[in-house]
């Protein structure tokens, strides 16, 4: 048995605002949108956004709001793309001693995501 796909499920305060961010800013395509849910993807990055306006946002849990680490083939190009779109960066692109070139972003709800490329 093998895992064939990974999707992250995120609670968001305002679904329409979050969908606009993931689509217009991060470049994900909408796959499904109905009844308080929207599924989006870009390549192997799949996210299921669920509207939960009555729950605390991810930003309320501070440093523990990391939700995903994505391995990409060109971290520098993706960093430049996101920076041009004024994505909120929590970590600038850096070559790390563990062999990854990586950077981090924070979504409007406070979900933190890291993107990295192997330096090998």
Image: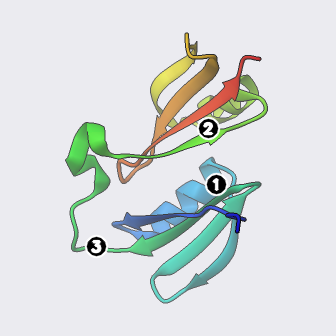
Q: CA distance from mark 2 to mark 3?
A: 26 Å
Which numbered disc, 2 or 3, marks the residue closer to the eye? 3
Q: Position of residue 23 (x, y in %)?
A: 64, 59
Instruction: Please name the residue shown 72% across and 65% down the image.
Output: 4
- Which numbered dot is residue 87? none
Instruction: Please name the residue shown 38% across and 67% down the image.
Output: 11
Which numbered disc, 3 or 1, marks the residue closer to the eye? 3
Task: Please determine whether, in this image, residue 60 is positioned above or below residue 88.
Answer: below
Task: Please report whichever mark, 2 or 3, sits nearer to the chain's N-terminal start.
Answer: 3
Question: Under tag 3, what secondary structure?
Answer: loop
Q: Quadrant of the N terminus?
A: bottom right
- Which numbered dot is residue 24? 1
Q: Which residue position is annotated with label 3?
A: 53
Instruction: Please name the residue shown 22% across and 47% down the image.
Output: 61
In terms of image quadrants, where is residue 5?
Answer: bottom right
Q: Is residue 106 left or right of residue 52?
A: right
Question: Under tag 2, what secondary structure?
Answer: loop
Q: Which residue position is annotated with label 2?
A: 85
């Amino acid at each position: 048995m093998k895992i064939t796909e990974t999707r992250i499920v995120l609670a968001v305060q305002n679904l329409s605002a979050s969908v606009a961010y993931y689509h217009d800013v991060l470049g994900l395509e909408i796959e499904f949108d109905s009844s308080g849910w929207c599924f989006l993807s870009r390549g192997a990055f799949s996210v299921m956004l669920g509207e939960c306006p009555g729950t605390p946002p991810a930003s309320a849990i501070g440093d523990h709001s990391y939700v995903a680490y994505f391995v990409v083939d060109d971290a520098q190009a993706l960093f430049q793309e996101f920076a041009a779109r004024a994505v909120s960066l929590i970590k600038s692109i850096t070559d790390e001693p563990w062999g990854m070139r990586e950077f981090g972003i924070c979504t409007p709800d406070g979900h933190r995501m890291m993107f990295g490329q192997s330096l090998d």
